[in-house]
Amino acid sequence: MTKMNISNNKKSTEIKVFDIKDIIDSIKLNIMFITFFSLLISCLSYFYAISLPNIYKSETVLLSFEDSSQDSISSLASQFSGIANLAGVNVGGGAAKTNKTLEGIEVLKSTKFLSNYILDRDIELPIFAALPDKGNKSFTIDPKKYDIANKGWVIEKPSVLSLVRSFKANNFTVFHDIKTGFVKISITHYSPELAKNMAEWIVIDLNAYFKNKHLEEARKTVEYLEKEIASNSIKPLEVIFYKLIEEQTKKIMLANTRDEYFFRTIDPPVIADIKFSPRRSVILILGTAFGGLVSLLIAFLAHFNNRSIKLDILPPKIYLVKTL
């Protein structure tokens, strides 16, 4: 009884070793299955690739302006901060210098700025309810989402946060090269013309945002300094205040005379003449390779279990019987 158990255990723990010859034999035995399965996956990859719509990209490269007026104000504030503190006046000498490029990028990616951009430019439909118009490099509005005739949403009207999320996920990317300081904004869409326009609009709106913000800050600063001049009779302080007013006035004049106030355009966006995606040849190659690897794995496992895969894909034979 014990001998029989030992022999059974030896059989159950017996390990099969395969070499290259076994792999070649498994391919030969299942060549029909490998070919058929690979062609099937290749055909599916082809139809999937051609079903994907063309997407076009428009890019623009920006560089921030150096703010020399801020350096002048900081030097004046630090130079006369002792006298101002004795008089009980704060001229802002301890303010930290911020990185203009990083500030611009954070504003550009913020929900507040993007929501205003989407609503002001009236691009809710191209972002949230667009369908590709194949062959025309354009787009149509999805009737399942928006009724053009009645000018109303068929689905629940998307919130501002939904519009911003959709824009960031499908249309908008920003890249900052730390070494050079260049900022690249990319916009993708079914329509190359709209992608180019959206890239232009977002730069215009970003410059306008900072221009209006700094104009308001400069005007408030001038009003504050004028009040301080009227309330203080110390001559050294008056000199400081007039110098600061002069710098703020320069800032206002510069903002009013320059359209590209915060970022200047190094490479403007253009209408793309070739698609950005999808890469159909890559999809087809990867699909075919995947089908071949999976079919080889199945064939090898079948050979491991001493089986072969048979495909009855040939037509049945017809026998003719001659009667006497």
Image (cartoon, helix red, strand yellow):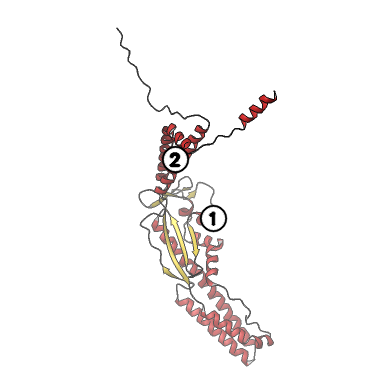
Give the x, y percent position of residue 311: 43, 29
Outermost residue toward the top in this view: 324
> In the current view of this chain or complex, which residue is farthest to the front?
3
Q: Position of residue 247 (x, y in %)?
A: 53, 83
The residue at the point 45 percent across, 75 percent down is 258
In the image, residue 308 above or below residue 187: above
Tag 1, which secondary structure? helix
Compared with residue 260, is residue 161 higher up or lower down, i.e. above or below? above
**For residue 259, what is the image quadrant?**
bottom left
Query: Crowding near pointer 1: few (<14 within 10 Å), some, many (20+)?
Result: some
Q: Position of residue 160 (x, y in %)?
A: 55, 56
Marks 2/1: CA–CA distance: 39 Å
Q: Quadrant of the N terminus?
A: top right
List x then y, in percent, for residue 321.
33, 13
Location of residue 53 with respect to 183 vertically, above or below: above
Please tell me which residue is depicted at 49% across the width and 52% down the height of the picture.
Answer: 128
Q: Quadrant of residue 200?
A: bottom left
What kind of residue is marked 2?
Answer: Gly
Q: Which mark is residue 292?
A: 2
- Camera-nearest residue between 53 and 220: 53
- Left or right: residue 272 versus residue 215 is left
Q: Residue at x 43, y 55 (%)?
A: 189
Identify which residue, 258 or 268, lies in the foreground: 268
Spot the residue most to the left. 324
Q: Which residue is mark 1?
A: 165
Lower position in the chain sequence, tag 2 or tag 1? 1
Query: Is 116 displayed left or right of 196 in the figure?
Result: right
